[in-house]
Image (cartoon, rainbow, N blue to C red):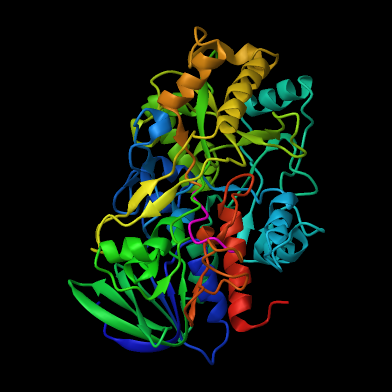
């Protein structure tokens, strides 16, 4: 369909985890018109519906930006792959489906940094509003919201063994990581509805698509924000081989994520003035923090060969078992293809000085390489380990003034010695748990890093040479009131009018866990801020 220039009250750029929420909520008012713009295509692929589809979409260029970082100095110059969703629903359409909010202290810290209205008690109502929680409503959870949150129904014996062995090592069982406390071991919850992925697109956008005041366009790359007298009045889109200008009467909202939102700001002349002038981009607002403050969860995995053929590796190694699992999902919407990437895990404290958990384990009933490498050709399982509040900081900068060229991604992983120390000690803990029955009964041998990797220097070297990220990039348009803040606590971009950012890039610090739930919460709160109904 050919898109023509038009005017709307609101334009939302990016139909990802937050953008779908913002557009759907704003369009609840029939007296306003909303345009939602997505660079990727529709989310109608079968692999975007079945939960285990992340194994394929994580490297599929049809729905994935497939970014690659710059060489990382602390990783011996290695480049790290960043999968990011390029379709309706954004990364919520291709992620591992784990629903984690982080810790109350994460949000109280945001408030302490000067962000009014972003403490835990302030954001909890938005988490509850978004939820349709399978376990019912309580002080921490809501029902009747767009986003289905369900328990893990397929309980692999390996997960039960992890919980028991962690308990024998002093880690208490936690039935709800999103409840009163995060600390402990237990099962994750997933963004799954009736056995299928419940992405932000499926949860929010699908019910809203019939509204006449909501227009959704796909396959349209935002090239530049249009400013008039210091106010954002529209956006130029590259679609169908031509550029089309869309204008907005009220506000433009960027929800492109931690890569694309700062990228579009920089391309549009909002960012560090010297960087912009070097590329011949006229400066609209000198904001030195655009693209800075990049944070992500970097870690690594410990993998084991399993004594019993009960892992996802075994399912995928057998045509018969693949067929049986596929039929179970198609007919009953259950089985091994209906679960998140991490089914169980734990949050615990490594540093004596930590008042709350500082490390996360993502326990996986499969094992393999990173992303495109595939599963190992033997029965195996894994634990992915990462510090939840990393101290290392990176940046995103322009590589070119050409909107079709990706920016330079320099995460600066593993640079801080505390991040390295936590990973080393966490791997020792993972080994200790794996050597404790009943989990020990399932361990034939440690595959990676291997029993010969023992000293702290050797373990650190393993993570340096083999680690990867969990793609929880945040912070590149951080919220705050200091000189490096890009948006204020109302999510308004500093130095210009009519422009906000609403996505993971506004997080001043990374939350303690997977970021999708928090990004959806940001979308909920942003919609209220825009409508002027937030307290």
Image location (x, y in percent) of residue 25: 57, 76
Q: Is residue 183 above or below residue 486?
A: above
**Residue found 46% across the figure and 20% down from its top:** 462
Q: Is residue 385 visible?
A: no
Q: Is residue 55 above or below residue 158?
A: below
Q: Which residues are magenta?
A: 473-479
Residue 59 relative to residue 507: left or right: left
**Residue found 67% across the figure and 33% down from its top:** 346
Query: Of all residues shown, which one is farthest toward the left?
Result: 241
Image location (x, y in percent) of residue 98: 58, 46
Query: In the image shown, does 456 or 30 lie closer to the viewer?
Result: 456
**Residue found 33% across the figure and 47% down from its top:** 66
Q: Is residue 289 visible?
A: yes
Image location (x, y in percent) of residue 406: 29, 55
Query: In the image shown, does 247 or 86 lie closer to the viewer?
Result: 247
Query: In the image shown, does 92 or 448 lie closer to the viewer?
Result: 448
Question: Is the C terminus in the top left, top right, bottom left or bottom right quadrant?
Answer: bottom right
Q: Is residue 272 above or below residue 195?
A: below
Query: Of all residues shown, which one is farthest toward the top?
Result: 452
């Amino acid at each position: 369909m050919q898109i023509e220039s038009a005017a709307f009250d609101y334009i939302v750029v990016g139909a990802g985890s937050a953008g779908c929420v913002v557009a759907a909520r704003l369009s609840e008012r029939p007296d306003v018109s909303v345009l939602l713009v997505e660079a990727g295509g529709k989310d109608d692929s079968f692999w975007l519906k079945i939960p285990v589809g992340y194994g394929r979409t994580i490297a599929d260029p049809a729905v994935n930006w497939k970014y690659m970082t710059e060489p990382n100095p602390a990783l011996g110059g290695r480049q790290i792959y960043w999968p990011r969703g390029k379709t309706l629903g954004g990364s919520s359409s291709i992620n591992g489906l784990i629903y984690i909010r982080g810790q109350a202290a994460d949000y109280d810290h945001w408030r302490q940094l000067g962000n009014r209205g972003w403490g835990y008690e302030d954001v909890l109502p938005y988490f509850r509003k978004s939820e349709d929680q399978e376990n019912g409503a309580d002080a921490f959870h809501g029902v009747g919201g767009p986003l289905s949150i369900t328990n893990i129904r397929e309980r692999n014996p390996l997960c039960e063994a992890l919980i028991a062995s962690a308990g024998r090592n002093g880690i208490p069982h936690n039935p709800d990581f999103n409840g009163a406390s995060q600390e402990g071991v237990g099962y994750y919850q997933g963004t799954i509805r009736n056995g299928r992925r419940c992405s932000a697109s499926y949860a929010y956008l699908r019910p809203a698509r019939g509204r006449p005041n909501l227009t959704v366009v796909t396959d349209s790359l935002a090239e530049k924000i249009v400013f008039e007298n210091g106010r954002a009045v529209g956006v130029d889109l590259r679609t169908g081989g031509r550029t089309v200008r869309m204008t907005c009467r009220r506000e433009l909202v960027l929800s492109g994520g931690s890569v694309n939102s700062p990228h579009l700001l920089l391309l549009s002349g909002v960012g560090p003035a010297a960087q912009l002038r070097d590329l011949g981009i006229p400066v609209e607002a000198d904001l030195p923090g655009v693209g800075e403050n990049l944070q992500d969860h970097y870690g690594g995995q410990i993998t084991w060969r399993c004594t019993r053929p009960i892992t996802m590796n075994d399912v995928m190694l057998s045509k018969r078992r693949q067929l049986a699992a596929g039929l179970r999902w198609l007919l009953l919407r259950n089985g091994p293809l209906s679960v998140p990437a991490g089914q169980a895990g734990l949050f615990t404290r490594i540093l004596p000085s930590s008042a709350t958990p500082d490390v996360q384990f993502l326990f996986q009933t499969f094992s393999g390489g990173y992303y495109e490498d595939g599963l190992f050709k033997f029965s195996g399982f894994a634990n992915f380990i990462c510090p939840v509040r990393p101290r290392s900081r990176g940046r995103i900068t322009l590589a070119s003034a050409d909107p079709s060229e990706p920016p330079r991604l320099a995460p600066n992983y593993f640079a801080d010695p505390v991040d390295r120390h936590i990973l080393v000690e966490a791997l020792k803990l993972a080994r200790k748990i794996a050597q404790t029955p009943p989990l020990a009964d399932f361990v034939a041998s440690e595959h990676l890093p291997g029993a010969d990797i023992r000293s702290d220097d050797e373990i650190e070297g393993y993570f340096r040479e083999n680690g990867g990220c969990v793609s929880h990039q945040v912070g590149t348009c951080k919220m705050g009131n200091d000189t490096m803040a890009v948006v204020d606590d109302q999510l308004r971009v500093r130095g210009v009018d009519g422009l906000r950012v609403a996505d993971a890039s506004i997080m001043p610090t990374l939350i303690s866990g997977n970021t999708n739930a928090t990004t959806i919460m940001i979308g909920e709160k942003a919609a209220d801020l825009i409508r002027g109904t937030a307290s």
